[in-house]
Amino acid sequence: MIGFITSNAILWPIVVPLTGAMLAMLFWSSPVAQRIVTAVALAAMLAAALILLDRILSDGQVAMTFGGWAPPFGISFVADRLGTAMVVVTAVLAAAVMLFGRADIRGRQEHSGFYPLMLGMLASINGAFLTGDLFNLYVWFEIMLITAMGLLVIDRTRAQLDGTIKYAVLNLFSTLLFLLAIAIVYGVTGTLNMADLSVVLGQTQDNAALALAAALFLVGFGIKAGYFPLFFWLPGSYHTASITVAAIFAGLLTKVGVYATFRIFSLFFEGGEAMRDVMAIMAAGTMLFGVFGAAVQWDVRRILSFHIISQIGYMLLGLAIGTPAALGGAAFYIVHHIIVKANLFLIAGAIYRASGTFDLRKSGGLMASHPMLALLFAIPALSLAGIPPLSGFWAKVMVIDASFQSGGGWLAAIGLFVGLLTIFSMSKIWIEAFWKPAPLGRSKPRPVPAVMLVSIAALSAITVWIGLQPEPLINYTLATGESLLDQGTYVRATFAGTTGELP
Amino acid sequence: MNLIYSAGIAAIMACGVYLLLSRHVMRIVYGVILISASVNLALFLAGRIGPNPPPLIPSGETVLSAGAANPLPQALVLTAIVIGLSLVAFAAALALQTFRTTGTLDSRKLTQAEALGSPYEEGKGQ
């Protein structure tokens, strides 16, 4: 039994939430049963992710091909260090955010199918992180898109409908570009297995069709991930979602796009200098425009939405530089950012609960009435800005140090400058919501449910823990950076243990 | 043959992009449908079309005959069509709900999300 579980470790992070989604769907009319199913599924997903992490730490990479077809014909699932790290963070984050959701999700949302949609989305996120097949990645993207749209519009308010239309149109367009890129790659190579593509494209002459496909991949994933200049849908829609949904979106959805960019452009479009230059400019634009956009906003959630974009720039920066250290730094940044950004959204929800508004002009006085919340806000806010000794400091050190070492001094300078502006936005939230006295005529601040504080505290504790004990994660992510550039290991892992000929 | 086919795909794609740039939400949805159709055709074309024998293995043999049609793109297109159908159905339902709630499908008037916390519209936030 235990042998069966560990030998199929790559399956469970996908199967568990998918089964949970189906079960929750069966209990459509009973929110209590759905809650129990979701809690069990999230706990099992966390266990599954840790089992997979254990396998990866001992074996390096794990792969599985379905349907009794040897790769490259069957659909492969491959877990490498990057994918596994994402799966583990997803499971941790989902557990913490859904704990917060216990106090935030309303009965009407439960009756609209909140739990099946959420579990389905988590299954598709894990699927995207673990798949080793290009078309399968597209399918996970589409499942993610439709469940995410369902979650985004779950309250059917005017703002949500408006935000969801923008989200739907641009994301549909991006997945169509992605599918077109798949069509071109398939036309050139005749294969969709990523490991096989890595081998075949290594032997193929560069041609116009492949350059076009690479550009389509970059734009398609760029819309998903929110790279400059393709990010406009993100601050136009994320802030309308209910706070539990927004926290999961902010933490995970854009990172799936980032992960896909990393996978594609490290495994089989290693890219020439021209691609790296384009990515560097996009990274610089993403960092700068995100942080400038945040500076003028007054809604906490919109400020945070713009900051998602600016932080995504640091991750793309790692890919643009492309050295093992830079890729490792970007992987560290992704892990750090998922935890911190989702936590900030949860705190925005707590601010709303306490002061009755997301608008910073109308809130205030929370420092006096909720000192604990103020302390918990300080941790992720300072971490986001990169203040030592929190996790964001190490993330920024790794990425910026790598850019200096490979001659990308101007990118490093932008990174440091954006860090400074991040402090500006965070202190704006601090001053307006916590420090300044409550505006006249506001009712007394209401208490924040303990469940909310517990989940915020748990995520803050992870941030502090990574900050004080960064070494295990730094070692892990540096090994991730090395393994991303070592396509041979990925290919061997996919083809290992099958009857398929090693190409 | 391939050239005619490509030109057709390009024409459909162009119509789709034109509709996508419209201000009316329903036209945008139609644009997505057309782009989706043209991408599906491109996927189909990527599998090399032509007067090929069907991909059936005769009894007694273990491999396909050379020059048989490639069945994989059809499976891919079928998947993409099903996914496209569900997403377009959702988009249409979304447009309907938007019209019922806000009374308009003109994207210039759909600004409720932008108004939240906007620096230009004092006090319009929640």
Image (spheres, coloured by chain):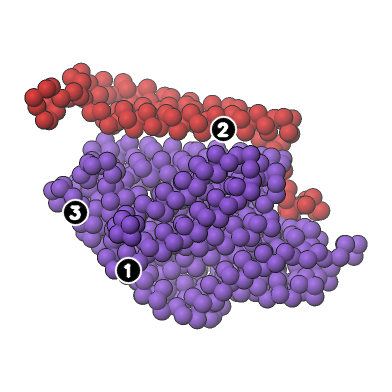
Chain colours: A purple, B red
Of marks 2 and 3, the one in the foreground = 3
Mark 1 and mark 3: Cα distance apart in space:
19 Å
The reply to whether residue A320 is in sight is no
Residue on which disc 1 sits: A57
Sequence-wise first label, 1 or 3: 1
Task: Determine the residue located farthest toward the right in the rendered image.
Answer: A441
Residue B101 position by quadrant:
top right
Q: Residue furthest left?
A: B60
Are the numbered discs 2 and 1 placed on the same chain, yes or no? no
Disc 2 target residue: B90
Q: Quadrant of residue B89?
A: top right
The residue tagged with tag 2: helix, strand or loop? Answer: helix
Query: Mark 2 against mark 1, which lies toward the viewer?
Result: 1
- Residue A87: numbered disc: none
Between the C-alphas of marks 2 and 3, the distance is 42 Å
- Could one spot residue A466 in this view of the protein? yes
Q: For the residues tagged 2 and 3, is the chain the same?
A: no
Q: SS for tag 3? A: loop
The amino acid type, in three-letter code, at marker 2 is Phe
